[in-house]
Amino acid sequence: MGLWDQFFGKKEKPKKPEEAKINRSLQKNLETIKGFLKDCDDVVYREFTIGKENKHKGAVIWIDGMVNKDLINNYIMESLMIDSRLVDPKPKAIKDNFIDLLKNKTLAVSEIEEVDTIEDVLVNIFSGETALLLDDYEKIIIIASRGWEGRGISEPETEAVIRGPRDGFTETMRFNTALIRRRIRDHRLKVKNYRVGVRSQTDVVVMYMEDIANKGVLEEVDKRLNKIDVDAIIESGQLEEFIEDEWQSLFPQIQNTERPDVAAAGIYQGRVILVVDNTPFALMVPTTFNMMMQSAEDYYERWDIGTMVRILRYFCLLIALYAPALYVGISSFHPQMIPTDLALTLAATRRGVPFPAVIEALIMEVTIEILREAGVRLPGAIGSTIGIVGGLVIGQAAVEAGIVGPLMVIVVAITAIASFAIPSYNLAISVRLIRFIILFSAAIFGLYGIMLITLVMLIHLCSLKSFGMPYLSPFVTFVHQFSDLKDAVIRAPQLMMNKRDVNAPKNQKGRMDDHQEEDFDIEEKK
């Protein structure tokens, strides 16, 4: 090649894996795979010979650290190099006899499949499988050998409960699906595999109950997953953004959970669960605002306790949204609404404070957010200490310095504590963001601004949907399904919650058999 051709001539583009084909020659297949896996030093190639006279060549390929080496050494290599010497394969009979002998009588492994493209070979190798190549055979055998190190099952940290199971999801997808299977011993529980991400090829599993799940939701999930075109999906949060209905909304439209019991309960209600590999969080669709205000413990305690806690939770939601804005709006625009004695006390506490109420609120709110973020990033014991000590020291110092009033410190502290009562972390973050919007509106228009933002927020929530389900269900759908209100703000006794929510098909609304309901009626009559 001349100098001109070297720099300006047409260069041959490297082939893509989907364009490469499997050859009958073992050496050509190895050269093709090694070309794609160039400079990948964690890939192991093991060539060997098989047969009585060691004339037939073979090779296995795997990635170090992603396979079970004991399985490869004791059940694959030993079978191929020792047990296979009992036969003498001939070139013409290699396909019909020897391959059948290897797959059905020699290899003592649980799963074996054949692939006919280099792309499938590479994807399986990167998934922790072992590829078996044989000379004079036009397919490559994939042997199940996954065995990477993983975190053990431990208690969920983001959804702690006093009464309930203590096991949580891990970063290994199959462990997570098994935890759900353990709770649902029904052949109608379906597990459908997807691969998302052009480069990452992340495994995503869709789990649902065949006769309970809404067919429209299943079709929409399938459509949105197949529509994703991105390099990589690292965590379920990235997948959530691709499949949610309105990415512009501040409200989360997909619920995530770290608890297998919550995922199993969602499947029993007709919801669809998405389990993503490499993350301990599963996604649940469709989702409503009411679902994010519920906790697993609501159903493990008696109905009266669950109802009381839920009502308290909604009250905390109102405090987290409106407390600072109400303080600013009333003290700045509507002081006549404050009782005289309280107004005098408030004026005395604010004597010498150089800033208006809205600046006070912003100073304290931003300080609390900084302390909260710093506490999350620091180690557990140190983080909680920083949060408590920092809040006390900074609040007291700010009051003594005359930067903020003591009543403002109390309001902001109560607001921060109330926000921790919201079970869903995603919803709690949204509430924190919306609180600032309401605060600025109150600083400009007073109580009228609070009402204006509230109306805009309610209109938005009424128009919002999650996979076709109204976001404010059952509060806006009780005309069609009044029984849904039994599991909304209140938690009715288990015997009364005999129907599934509005998402389930009409023929699967009942959670209890007819004869069970008749027995309950008989008991009540007695």
Image (cartoon, grey):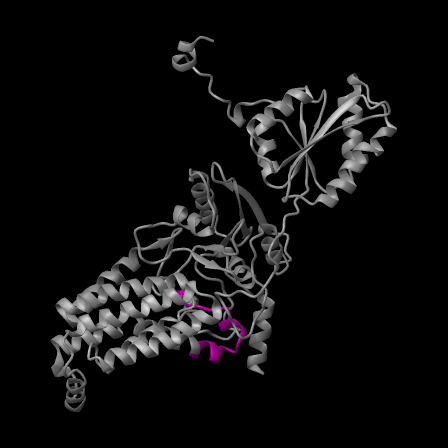
Which quadrant of the structure image shows residue 90? top right
**Front in this rendered view, residue 343 or 311:** 343
Residue 494 visible to the viewer? yes
Part of the protein shown in magenta: 290-308
> Please, which residue is most extreme toward the bottom here?
341
The structure residue drawn at horizontal position 54% and vertical position 52%, both measured from the top left corner, is 208
| Side (left or right) of 464 relative to 90 | left
| Residue 76 among magenta residues | no
How many numbered callouts?
A: 0
> Please, which residue is most extreme toward the top here?
2
The structure residue drawn at horizontal position 58% and vertical position 49%, both measured from the top left corner, is 190
Q: Position of residue 386 (x, y in %)?
A: 40, 72
Q: Position of residue 111 (x, y in %)?
A: 70, 40
Q: Position of residue 325 (x, y in %)?
A: 22, 72
Residue 479 visible to the viewer? no
Q: Position of residue 215 (x, y in %)?
A: 48, 48
> Please, which residue is most extreme toward the front here?
3
**Front in this rendered view, residue 470 or 113:** 113
The structure residue drawn at horizontal position 39% and vertical position 69%, both measured from the top left corner, is 422
The main secondary structure of the magenta stretch is helix
**Front in this rendered view, residue 126 or 141:** 126
Q: Quadrant of the C terminus?
A: bottom right
Which quadrant of the structure image shows residue 477? bottom left
Which quadrant of the structure image shows residue 220? top left
Residue 210 sits above or below residue 412 on the image: above
| Residue 298 among magenta residues | yes
